[in-house]
Image (cartoon, grey):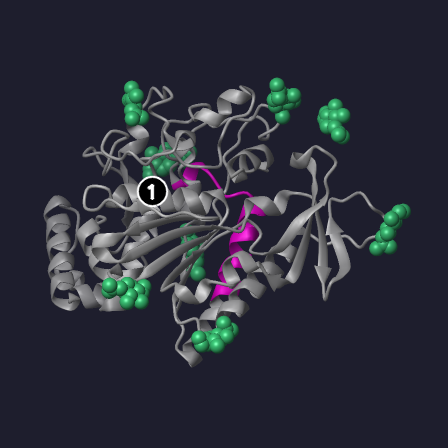
Amino acid sequence: MEKTLDKTVSSKVFIFTLSLILISSITLSFLKSPRSPLPLPSIPRSLDKYCDVFKGKWVPYPQGPYYSNETCRLIVDQQNCMKFGRPDTEFMKWRWKPDDCELPLFDAAHFLEIVTGKSMAFVGDSVARNQMESLLCLLAHEANPEDVSHYSKRWFYANYNFTLSAIWSPFLVKSRVADNNGNSSNGLFSLYLDEADETWAKEIEKFDYVIISAGQWFFRSQLFYENDRIIGCYNCNQNNITSISKYQACRTVFGTALQTLLSHKNYTGTTFLRTFSAAHYEDGDWDSGGNCVRTRPFAHNETKLQEFNMEFYSIQAEELRKAKEKGKKIGLRFELMNTTEIMWLRPDGHPSRYGKFMKKNATVNDCVHWCLPGPIDTLNEFLLYLMSKEVL
Ligand SMILES: *[C@@H]1O[C@H](CO)[C@@H](O)[C@H](O)[C@H]1NC(C)=O
Ligand SMILES: *[C@@H]1O[C@H](CO)[C@@H](O)[C@H](O)[C@H]1NC(C)=O
Ligand SMILES: *[C@@H]1O[C@H](CO)[C@@H](O)[C@H](O)[C@H]1NC(C)=O
Ligand SMILES: *[C@@H]1O[C@H](CO)[C@@H](O)[C@H](O)[C@H]1NC(C)=O
Ligand SMILES: *[C@@H]1O[C@H](CO)[C@@H](O)[C@H](O)[C@H]1NC(C)=O
Ligand SMILES: *[C@@H]1O[C@H](CO)[C@@H](O)[C@H](O)[C@H]1NC(C)=O
Ligand SMILES: *[C@@H]1O[C@H](CO)[C@@H](O)[C@H](O)[C@H]1NC(C)=O
Ligand SMILES: *[C@@H]1O[C@H](CO)[C@@H](O)[C@H](O)[C@H]1NC(C)=O
C-alpha cells in the first residue's frame, strides 16, 4: 500500500502523585462535562478496573493541540503539515472521549516520572516511528533529548536517564528484498515467518516498554519461508508456489514476534501492541490518484472499517490475547492498544499533499502517516494511561 512512502522513509512515587493527577483530571473533566453522571464511578481505581477507554467517540476540543511546529522543533518535514501549507486547523481540535470515563490528558511530567531510569522502544514501520515522534513532541516542553542514533533512531533524556528508540522492522520477522528488479517499490520481499527480525530481537532485553505495530507492508508482494524453505507466496505471480494470504502471513508474523518476547530469557518489559493503523485513500489507491481531503472526523454512523482492515485488526488483537494469557503465567505483561477503529474515524489526520517528500511526486498523497500535531497524539495518551495503570 505505502510502497513509495515507506521506501522513501526507510532510507536512512508515584501512587500518591498519580492519584492526585488522576483525581484532578477527573475532577476537571467532571466539572467540564455537565453530562457526566454521579461522581461515584469516577474513583480512579474503579475507573481503571472497569472502564474501557477504547470505547467512545471523538469530541470537539477547542483548546487545540499540546504543541505546535514552533514549540516542538523535532517534527520531521514529512509530518509537518502546517509548514507545508495545510490550510485547515480543525483536525487538531478533537479529543477522544471514552463513554464511561475520561482519558486523562497527556502529562509529560508524569510520563517522565514513570520512565526515569528506563527505556522504551517502538518496533515496527514508519507509522511506529511517527508515534514515537509524537511522543517526542508531547515531552518537548518538559525535557530535551539528545540524538544518540546509530542504526536505529534513538533519543536520550539525560535528566531522566530515559532512552527512547524507534527500531525499524516493518515486517517484524527476518526479511530481505527477494528479486530486486530495480523497481524496489514493486520488489518482492522474502519473509522468514518463523524467525523474529534480529534488528529488534537481539537487543529487546534492554527495553522496559516495547510498543509493537505493523501492517502496511503486508500489502506488498511476498515470498514466505519457514525452516528456511519456501512455503508459499502472496501476489508473486509464480504458479508453482502455493498462494498464502497476507492475513495468514500477518497472523504468523505476530505469533512469532510475540512468542519471541514470551520465550526470551532476559526480557522483562511490558509489551503494548498498537493495532493496525489503516490508510484512508479515497477515489483511488495510493498509486492511482487516491487522496484524503476530509477535514473532520467520521461519525460512527457515517463509516465502517473495510473488511481487509478489520481482518488485520482482528488477527493482531487475537494474537495479543493469546500472548497476554501466556504472559500472565510467567509474569510478563502484554497490553492491547485497541486503536484501529478509533484512528479509522480520523480520515482528516493525514498529511495528504502537505508533507515534504510528497513534493517529489505530486501525484502521490500521504494518507498513511499522521500530521504532527494531530490525532496520533491520542495514541500516546492511551500509552500513558496504560502505563499508569501498571503503576497503580
Ligand atoms: C510552522 O507552520 C507555519 C505555518 O502554520 C509555517 O509558516 C512555519 O514555517 C512552520 N515552522 C516550522 C519551524 O516548521
Ligand atoms: C540509567 O538507567 C539504566 C537502565 O536503563 C541503568 O542501568 C543505569 O544504572 C542508570 N544510570 C544511572 C546513572 O542512574
Ligand atoms: C521499472 O518500472 C518502469 C515503469 O513501471 C519501467 O519503465 C522500467 O523499465 C522498470 N525498470 C526495471 C529495471 O525493471
Ligand atoms: C518455480 O518456477 C521457477 C521457474 O519456473 C523456478 O525458478 C523456481 O525455482 C520454482 N520454485 C519452486 C519453489 O519450485
Ligand atoms: C541473558 O543474559 C545472560 C547474562 O547476561 C546472557 O549470558 C545470555 O546470553 C542472555 N540470553 C539471551 C537469550 O539473550
Ligand atoms: C509519480 O507516481 C505515479 C504513480 O505511482 C507514477 O505513475 C509516475 O510515474 C510518478 N512520477 C514520477 C516523476 O516519478
Ligand atoms: C448520525 O447520527 C447523528 C446523531 O448522532 C445524526 O444527526 C445523523 O443524521 C446520522 N447520520 C447518518 C448518516 O445516519
Ligand atoms: C476494540 O474496539 C472495538 C471498537 O472500536 C470493539 O468493537 C472491540 O470489541 C474492541 N476489542 C477488544 C479486544 O476490546
Q: Quadrant of residue 141?
A: top left
Left or right: 319 as drawn, with respect to 242:
left
Would you name the residue on which mark 1 appears? 134
Q: Amino acid at mark 1?
A: Ser
Left or right: 237 as drawn, with respect to 219:
right
Q: Which residues are magenta?
A: 300-320
**Mark 1 surroundings within 10 Å by alpha-carbon count, few (fewer than 14), some (14 through 19), many (20 or more):** many
Left or right: 299 as drawn, with respect to 171:
left
Q: Nearer the viewer, residue 292 or 86?
A: 86
Instruction: Name the spot of residue 42 as percent of width and height, x first.
Output: 17, 60
At x 35%, y 52%, the residue is: 164
Task: Assign ligand 3 to one image quadrant.
Answer: top right
At x 57%, y 37%, the residue is: 7
Whether residue 257 is situated above or below residue 134 in the rendered picture: below
Q: Give yes or no for residue 301 being in the magenta stretch.
A: yes
At x 48%, y 26%, the residue is: 357
Instruction: Name the spot of residue 391 as percent of width and height, x first.
Output: 24, 67
Quadrant in which the N terminus appears: top right
Res. 240 visible in picture: no
Instruction: Name the spot of residue 308 as percent of width and height, x first.
Output: 59, 46
Quadrant in which the C terminus appears: bottom left
Instruction: Count the labels in the image.
Output: 1
At x 37%, y 46%, the residue is: 132
In the image, the residue with mark 1 has its CB under 8 Å from the nearest atom of ligand 1: no
Left or right: 364 as drawn, with respect to 355:
right
Q: Nearer the viewer, residue 267 or 336?
A: 267
